[in-house]
Image: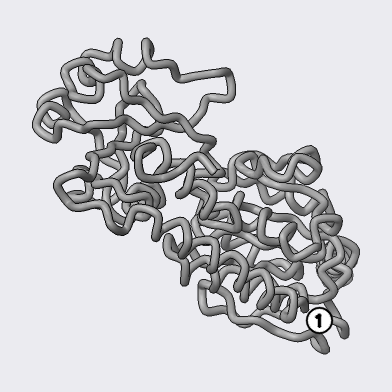
Amino acid sequence: MVGSNSGRRQTRWFRSSSMAVVLLLALSVLAPSCGFKALAAETVVDASGRTVATGPGTRILTLGSDVTEIVDALGAGERIIAVDRGSKYPVAVAQKPNVGYRRQLSVEGLVALRPDLILAAQDSGPPEAIEVLKSLAIPVVFVPEDNSPQGIERKITLIAAALRLEDKGREVSRRVLDAFRAAADLTAKIPAERRKKVVFFHGLVRLSAAGAGTAADAIIRYAGGINPMAVVQGYKAASEEKLIEMAPDVILMMSDGKGGPTAEQVFGTRALSATPAAEKRALIVLDGAYMIGFGPRTADAIRDLAQALYPEVVGAD
C-alpha cells in the first residue's frame, strides 16, 4: 500500500511538473521578448503605473484607434500584426487581423497571434481579461486616456519610448501639437452669444449623449461649440423633455459606415424632432475614430467640425 501511494504521488507530481513545463514553453514561444532579453530591455512606465520591459516590439498588437494611428505616424505601422475593431486608419493597417472590440477582449485570441508587444488603450477590457494579460510574459503597455493636446503628446511620448523611437516621437509631437493649436484657434474669436449648442449621440436607439469628460465633449469645445450635456459626467440618456430644455442647435453623430445616419432618421426621432436643430436640419456626421480618437488626426477633426459649425468664420481651405 505504501508503495502504491508513493507511486500515485509521483504520478501526480510528474503530471503537474509536465504541465508547468508545457506552460513555460508555450509562454516562451508566444512571447519571444521574455527571458534574458526582457531583463535587458529598456522599460517604460505605462498609464497604470506599471514598469514594463517592452522587448523588441517587432510584432505589435494595437488596441485603440489613437494607439494604432500613433504607431503608424511613428513609422512603425509595418510592425503591427493585428488591431482592434475601432482601428480603421490607415487603410493598410486596418486590413490586418481584427481582434474585435477592445473592451470585450478574448485573451486566447490575442495570445494566438503571437505578439511580442501589446499597446492598449487604458480603457481596454474586460477587467478579468486585462488581469490575465498582465500575468503573461507578453509585454503590455497601457496608453493613457486624455482628451487634450497634452494628452496626445503623452500618448506619443509613451508609445515612442516603448518602440525606442524617441527622436521620431518628438518630431511627431511637435507636428501634431502645432496643428492642434492652429485648429483650436480658428474659432477662438467667436463671441459666446454666437457659439452653437451641440449634442453628440452615439446612436439613435437609446439616445445616449456625451457629457463632461468624454472625447466628444472635448472635440465640441475645441471646435468652438457648447455642449449643454456637460452638466453631467460621461454618457447619459437624454429624454425628450431634457432635449427640449437644452435646445441644441446642432446634432453631432458618428457615421454608421453605410451613408448614415441621415437627417430623416435623426430628426424623425420624436425626442429630437422638437429641437432647434430639427428646424434647420442641422446634422453633422463624422467618422468615429477620426472624431473622438484624440490622436494624430484630431486637429483635422476639430477643423472639420469648426468649419461645419461656422462656415462663415472658418474657410474651406
At horizontal 40% and vertical 33% (from top left) the residue drawn is 202
Callout 1: few (<14), some (14-19), or many (20+) C-alpha neighbours within 10 Å?
many
Where is 198 relative to 144, above or below? above
Name the residue carrying label 1.
38
Which residue is at a point 62% across and 59% down the rendered structure image?
120
Residue at (73, 50) in percent of width and height: 110
Instruction: Give how far across and how far down residue 86 sits, in percent.
Output: 60, 41
Q: In which quarter of the view is residue 155 placed?
A: bottom right
Residue 79 visible somewhere in the drawing: yes
Q: Looking at this rendering, what residue extends furthest in the bottom direction?
A: 40
Q: Is residue 204 left or right of residue 13?
A: left
Q: Point out the image quarter for the C terminus.
A: top right
Query: Looking at the picture, which amino acid does disc 1 mark?
Result: Ala
Q: Nearer the viewer, residue 82 or 6?
A: 82
Figure check: 268 above or below 261: above
251 relative to 86 in the view: left or right: left
Q: Nearer the viewer, residue 59 or 157?
A: 157
Q: Secondary structure at mark 1?
A: helix
- The one of 42 and 286 positioned closer to us in this rendering: 286
Q: Quadrant of the N terminus?
A: bottom right
**Location of residue 75 in the rendering, given as x and y in whole percent from the top left corner:** 80, 63
